[in-house]
Amino acid sequence: MNIFKIVILDLIMVFGWGKKKPQKQEPEIAPQKKQILLSDVPNVIDEIHSIRTKTIIAETKTFKNKIKSSCETILHIAIDLERDTLNVDDIDVHLKRLVERGKKEVISVIKRESIVQLPEINSYGDVKNFNAIAGRMLKKIGDSLGRQSSVIHIFAKKYAGKLKDDLKVMTDGNDEISTIITNYTELETKIEQILNTMNKIEQSKKSISDLGEQEKLTTKTIDDLIATIDSDEKEIENIKNSSEYTEFLQINEKLDSLSSEKNKIRNEIELHLTKISRPLNKYVYVSSLDKPLKKLLADLIANPYDVLVDSNKQDIIQILESTRKGIQSGSVSVKDTDKSLLQIDETLLLIPGFIEKISVFNRSKSDIESKLLGFNNGQLKQKESVLSKHRNDKSSLESKIRSIEKELKDTTELIPKFVKSVESILNEISAVQYVIRTE
């Protein structure tokens, strides 16, 4: 077994650090119950905090007195040990040197550490400072005794018990202070949790108040919009019930009916032009027409309705007559020459009538459209646009109301949970069991 193991074993045997004697369990006393308002909680936790602070200061002061007394006792033991020769003159010289060195180290550490100036205890900060200083002092003495455990146990056995007892008193006391500091830190953490939750309750109450105000204002705005929408609808209805608007609708109906008339004329023209489309298409490639007439010919084939106007009449007749000559001369080849010539002749006779029909139709359409210009349809469109906007605004506000109501419900449900959390944490740090009532 090496020297390190011997030191550890002797340290446990001599100084007995380790298990505490089991304490007798006190019979449980039912905690006192007290009902308080939520607004009382800050005062309650201030009182708890103040009592705990005073308690830890008082307990630390008591321990400081004990440790001072124990330090004096240990110092006297060290002085006695220093004077004691330990009867090592008859032992092996190497062992004697080991014992004397160990004895000297223990005495030196005890003398140095037992006179360490301990701070005054007037605040929680002083308590933590004292605990740290006392802890370092006890560790150094304990480490020294641990290192020289074999020397003390074997050659200075009569001092071992005294050192053990006094060191244990000091160590146990400082451990209790450490535990109290840990508990005090937990207390401060829980107090902070309570205050944070209290702050959440206040924020929730303010949020409920603000949301309630928003709900009132939004509801009023919706009510105003409902009245405005009703007014908009009546104004639009009055416009639509007027004789002017009735006439406007009738004219629009006439204008719409012209569409079928236009299609009828278009179909009639295309039916006749289709009969001569083959020779016309062939004439495009063999004709010596100038560029404008060639374009007119192409448009006549593609969309005859749009080019049959009085200004194009002579050019169209010229194109048809030139095509006829081309068929007669054979430059425009067709399957049935006589039939093609007959169809072109018929078309030549119909062209003036087609142009007249289109012209009459366009004049009729222009007359109707000019009548529409006399009606102020912009007012109706503006009213309908305003109505649409007001309806959209109302829909958006109704959606906002639903969101506010949901947020109000969720926030209102949170407050009892927050209060329960405050109550639960408060009862963890207090001997009195509180029941919190909201105002």
Image (cartoon, grey):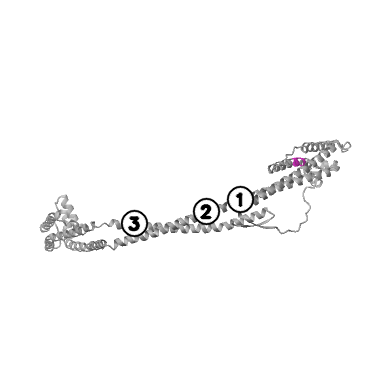
Residue 111 rendering spot, x and y as whole percentages: 79, 36
Query: Marks 3 and 2, Cα distance to the nearest angstrom?
Result: 37 Å
Amino acid type at mark 2? Ser
Marks 3,2: beta carbons within 8 A: no
**270 and 287: which one is in front?**
270
Q: Sequence-wise, which precedes: disc 3 or disc 2?
A: 2
Pointer 2 residue: 207
Tag 2 secondary structure: helix
Marks 3,1: beta carbons within 8 A: no
Q: Sequence-wise, which precedes: disc 3 or disc 1?
A: 1
Amino acid type at mark 1? Leu
Pointer 3 residue: 385
Q: Does 272 appear above or below 129?
A: below
Looking at the rendering, which quadrant does residue 379 occupy?
bottom left
Looking at the rendering, which quadrant does residue 380 occupy?
bottom left
Q: Can residue 254 be seen in this view?
A: yes
Q: Is the magenta stretch mostly helix, strand or loop?
A: helix
Amino acid type at mark 3? Ser
Q: Image quadrant for the N terminus?
A: top right
Query: Marks 1 and 2, Cα distance to the nearest angstrom?
Result: 18 Å
Residue 435 rendering spot, x and y as whole percentages: 64, 58
Query: Marks 3 and 1, Cα distance to the nearest angstrom?
Result: 54 Å
- Residue 301 in the magenta stretch? The answer is no
Looking at the rendering, the stretch of residues picked out in magenta corresponds to 137-142
Q: In this view, does 317 lie to the left or right of 243?
A: left
Q: In this view, does 314 lie to the left or right of 45?
A: left
Classify mark 2: residues with Cα within 10 Å, few (<14), some (14-19) or many (20+): some
Q: Does 47 appear above or below 359?
A: above
Classify mark 1: residues with Cα within 10 Å, few (<14), some (14-19) or many (20+): some
